[in-house]
Image (cartoon, grey):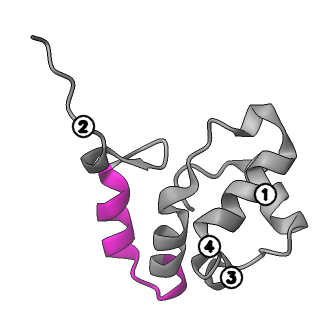
Amino acid sequence: AVEGIGPKIEHLLNEAGITTWNQLAHTSLETLKEILDKAGERYQLADPSTWSKQAAMASEGQWKELFEYQDRLDGGKDRQDVPAMSLS
């Protein structure tokens, strides 16, 4: 499974013709954002920025690498991409 994609978002992707890991892996971030935007406000919090990378690993059977990558994710977002908060 791709972290950050639950049943409702999976349904949206399927309706948009994205039904395989390979298709998701080759879907642009812009297209994923358009799908979410069209679905309404409730989906605007979803961050599809790692979905294609996760799907590519799944499509290629790179399960160990996928699970290691997902350990770094928080709700589908790469924690390494988020700047640390300063307490000063």
Q: CA distance from mark 3 to mark 4?
A: 10 Å
Question: Pointer 4 and pointer 1: residues touching (CB < 8 Å)?
Answer: no
Residue under numbered circle 2: 83
Q: Which residues are magenta?
A: 58-72
Q: Which residue, as the protein is rendered here, is positioned at the far right?
A: 15
Q: Which residue, as the protein is rendered here, is positioned at the far bottom?
A: 60
What amino acid type is highlighted by mark number 2? Answer: Pro
Residue 58 position, x and y percent, is 50, 77
Residue under numbered circle 1: 35
Q: State which mark lies toward you, 1 or 3.
A: 1
Q: CA distance from mark 2 to mark 1?
A: 27 Å
Residue 21 position, x and y percent, is 63, 78
For residue 69, side relative to residue 84 (left or right): right
Task: Please tell me whether mark 1 sits on a helix, a strand or a loop.
Answer: helix
Q: Quadrant of residue 30?
A: bottom right
Q: How many marks?
A: 4
Disc on the earlier residue, 3 or 4 = 3
Disc on the earlier residue, 3 or 2 = 3
Question: Pointer 1 and pointer 3: residues touching (CB < 8 Å)?
Answer: no
Task: Please tell me whether mark 2 sits on a helix, a strand or a loop.
Answer: loop
Q: Which residue, as the protein is rendered here, is positioned at the far top?
A: 88
Q: Quadrant of residue 32?
A: bottom right
Please tell me whether residue 36 is drawn above or below residue 1 in the rendered image. above
Q: CA distance from mark 4 to mark 1?
A: 11 Å
Q: Which mark is residue 28?
A: 4
Q: CA distance from mark 4 to mark 2?
A: 24 Å
Residue under numbered circle 3: 23
What amino acid type is highlighted by mark number 3? Answer: Gln
